[in-house]
Image: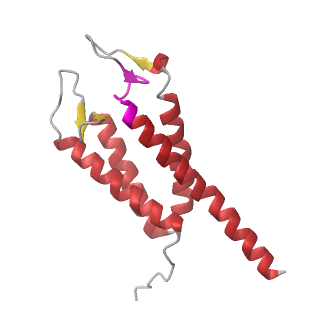
Amino acid sequence: MIQETKKGWTPNRTLALVLGIVFLILGLVGFITPTENSTGVRAILGIFDSDTFQNVFLLITGLLGLVAAFTGWSVLFNRVFGVVYTLVGLLGLIPALYFPVYGNDNGRFLGLTHLSVADHILDIVLGLLALALGFYLIQRSNSRRKAAAI
């Protein structure tokens, strides 16, 4: 017999689902967006730089978000997502971390992928949101439960 999950849609679970869907869509759209130049850079919606490495990374992030939303791991997903994406967003603002690959390419972040300012802003905003929900809401709800038990 299949057991139905009775868990409610907490803010952490909702965020993990939304992030999963958004990043899955961004990864898929990145593969079908035509390249802009010979370096293989694509511009998703005309503002987010993308290449094959980043599209795969976005797809993996999206799948992990969906899995986390439906398996009870949404808090951990939001915490890890928040740390990783906030760090990537902030480190991406340091020009010394971009390594030119060939020609007049502006460089790839850590030699792996192209990122734009819009990518950094999105990563920082979503990372901080995930950190806030992943850490703050859990501590707040735990302190309410402790206060109610007293």
Q: Is residue 53 above or below residue 106?
A: below
Q: How many marks?
A: 0
Q: Position of residue 44 (x, y in %)?
A: 25, 40
Color encoding of the figure: secondary structure
Outermost residue, bottom direction? Answer: 1
Q: Is residue 133 above or below residue 55?
A: below
Outermost residue, top direction? Answer: 103
Q: Position of residue 6 (x, y in %)?
A: 49, 83
Q: Residue at x 56, y 44 (%)?
A: 83
Q: Residue at x 49, y 66 (%)?
A: 13
Q: Quadrant of the C terminus?
A: bottom right
Q: Position of residue 124 (x, y in %)?
A: 49, 41
Outermost residue, right direction? Answer: 150
Q: Residue at x 32, y 16 (%)?
A: 101
Res 136 → quadrant: bottom right
The magenta span reads 107-118
Q: Position of residue 105 (x, y in %)?
A: 29, 16
Res 19 → quadrant: bottom left
Q: Is residue 17 visible?
A: yes
Is 108 contained in the magenta span? yes
Res 116 → quadrant: top left
Q: Nearer the viewer, residue 83 or 36?
A: 36
Does residue 108 appear to the left or right of 45 in the view shown? right
Does residue 40 appear to the left or right of 145 in the view shown? left
Q: Residue at x 40, y 17 (%)?
A: 99
Is 79 contained in the magenta span? no
